[in-house]
Image (cartoon, helix red, strand yellow):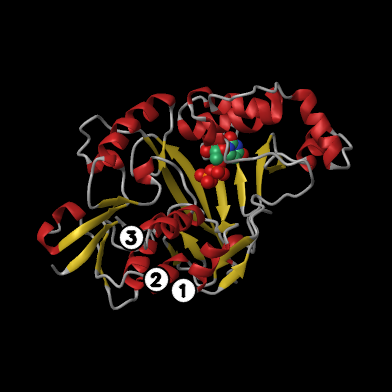
Amino acid sequence: MKYDYLIAGAGFAGITAARLIADVLNKRVLVVDLRNHVAGNAYDYTDDNGILVHKYGPHIFHTNDEKVFNFLSQFTGWYKYEHKVVSRYEGSDYPIPVNMVTLNKLYSLNLTNAEETKKYLDSVTSGIGNPKNSEDLMLARVGRELYGKFFERFTEKIWFEHPSKLAPNVCGRINVRFDDDCRYFTDKYQFMPDKGYTKMAEKMLTHKNIDVELETDFKAVNKNTYSKLVYTGPIDSFFDYIHGKLPYRSIEMIFENHKEEFYQNYAVVNFPGDEPYYRITEYKRITGGKSDSTTICKEFAARDGERFYPKRTIDALELFNKYKKDAEKLKGVFFAGMHPYFQYYDIGQVVAQCLRSIGKPA
Ligand code: UDP
């Protein structure tokens, strides 16, 4: 056999798996991807104005895991970056996650420390013990009013589904803060790859044991050329949709270049109101480019189109469990990344998952 492993998907799951198998196990690997580039949804490129942009929406690297950071540091230098997001409600910008600053600004309060902030939030939250959906969870975290302003409509706008129909960990990704820390993440390592994700991905794949074929469906690869498979795509597609299609949501993006130094005060502004888009990202603020102009991206929610986000409704999880049972019976097939688990993971989580499992395959 020409290859020990076929890897379906050249996103960060496939790339990390490939590198580990090639390096740690010293096995031959073929990586295939349907798209015409590597790096999956983290793919970035320099646009006509010299600004590094993310084709499929902003991907911010953050991890608490030293192993993840050290592993990736073999393939890139880093640019120090701490992400900040605001939500524009009735013309004013409020920090997300909700924190002391959000509350003071919204209600003209004068909370001065975490204890006072916690006390205030305790007085408005309903304290639901075991939240069964995203609405229950956010009511318990921030209370009815903040949930309504910043989460309920926003979530419905992007998911086409009320938060009460979505699993708790959909909105659960956003915590609540009691202090004035306005960063989106609090992880120990918050950096961006200094030459971008695509360059980092290409370096990970540059290895004597790794071949890459783009615009290739793994189902079209001759089974006699490999013995094991690492699959990183959607699980329903792997099984040819035998139990039905898992719901995903898609996104549409419009890039615009503006002839001004900066367009907005933050890297990302969320729009929970009537605007047709749900967020605007200004890439210079994330990737640190120097240019006379600035490139922004308006993101719109789309029901159909490329499958970006697993839509973890309660019903969808039942369907997913059928595929999960089928997957557990397979031999010689390994699953990596977010899609096979029908679960949204950050790059750091995907790399951590591969580091945990690869090197000890069955
Ligand atoms: N969310 C929200 N309001 C916000 C930010 C997030 O309601 O201002 C909800 C929304 O449902 C979203 C989820 O929280 O899907 C997770 O947000 P996150 O920023 O992690 O999504 P990402 O940008 O990673 O897709």
Q: Label 2 is placed on what type of residue?
A: Met
Say which residue label 3 marks.
Answer: 10
Among the two numbered marks 1 and 3 on one chain, the one whose residue lies closer to the N terminus? 3
Query: Is 105 or 50 nearer to us in this picture?
Result: 105
Question: What label does residue 75 carry, if any?
Answer: 1
Q: Label 1 is placed on what type of residue?
A: Phe
User: Is the distance from the Cβ of mark 2 to the nearest ligand 1 atom less than 8 Å?
Assistant: no
Mark 1 element type: loop
Could you classify mark 1 by the number of other residues whose Cα lies within 10 Å: few (under 14), some (14-19), or many (20 or more)? some
x then y, percent, for residue 355: 44, 60
Mark 3 element type: loop
- Residue at the spot x=38%, y=40% of the render? 342
x then y, percent, for residue 142: 70, 30
* Quadrant into which the C terminus falls: bottom left
As displayed, is residue 171 above or below residue 228?
above
Contact between labelled residues 3 and 1, with CB atoms less than 8 Å apart: no
* Quadrant into which the N terminus falls: bottom left
Ligand 1's quadrant:
top right
As displayed, is residue 285 above or below residue 254?
below
Could you classify mark 2 by the number of other residues whose Cα lies within 10 Å: few (under 14), some (14-19), or many (20 or more)? many
Res. 93 visible in picture: yes
Question: What label does residue 204 carry, if any?
Answer: 2
Among the two numbered marks 2 and 3 on one chain, the one whose residue lies closer to the N terminus? 3
Q: Is residue 324 rendered to the left or right of residue 347?
A: left
Could you classify mark 3 by the number of other residues whose Cα lies within 10 Å: few (under 14), some (14-19), or many (20 or more)? many
The span from disc 1 to disc 3 (Cα, nearest Å) is 16 Å
Q: Label 3 is placed on what type of residue?
A: Ala
Contact between labelled residues 1 and 2, with CB atoms less than 8 Å apart: yes
Q: Is residue 194 rendered to the left or right of residue 101?
A: left
Classify residue 98 by image quadrant: top right
